[in-house]
Amino acid sequence: MNKAELIAQIAEETGITKTQANAALDSFIGAVTKTLKKGDKVTLVGFGTFSVSKRQARTGRNPQTGATIKIKAKKVAKFKAGKELSAKI
């Protein structure tokens, strides 16, 4: 399912227009992004938790040349499914 299909399904199930559903989804994504940027987490009971994890710097290999390269440390977004979501899948 892509974003357009998700918007269409939200609009159909809630009885709002696709434009309103798109605005709601964009607002949700923006709020989650802003919260994760601050380093906080977003917990939706029954669905799951969005959080930020720190990856340490490490060494890797260039697959074409086999040369050793340094990979910088970075922050990555993480999602952990809640109990109810896991049970439904």
Image: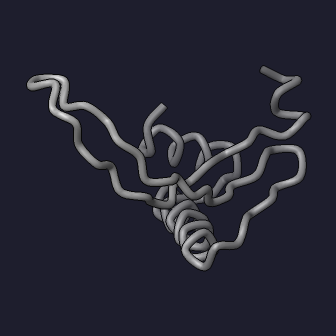
Please state the horizontal and vertical placement of residue 85, each as a whole percent of the image: 82, 33
Q: Is residue 58 left or right of residue 16?
A: left
Of 46 and 3, which appears nearest the observer?
46
Taking the spot 68% from the left edge, 55% from the top edge, the residue there is 50
Residue placed farthest to the left in the image?
65
Q: Is residue 57 left or right of residue 69?
A: right
Please state the horizontal and vertical placement of residue 46, each as a whole percent of the image: 88, 44
Taking the spot 66% from the left edge, 53% from the top edge, the residue there is 15
Give residue 35's quadrant in the image. bottom right
Please state the horizontal and vertical placement of residue 17, each as a whole percent of the image: 53, 58
Total marks drawn? Answer: 0
Q: Please say which color scheme the image uses.
A: one colour
Q: Is residue 40 left or right of residue 12?
A: right
Of 7 and 16, which appears nearest the observer?
7
Of 17 and 59, which appears nearest the observer?
59
Q: Is residue 82 above or below residue 15?
A: above
Q: Is residue 29 above or below residue 5?
A: below
Please state the horizontal and vertical placement of residue 47, each as a whole percent of the image: 80, 44
Taking the spot 58% from the left edge, 40% from the top edge, the residue there is 9
Give residue 3's quadrant in the image. top left
The C terminus sits in image quarter: top right
Give residue 83's quadrant in the image. top right
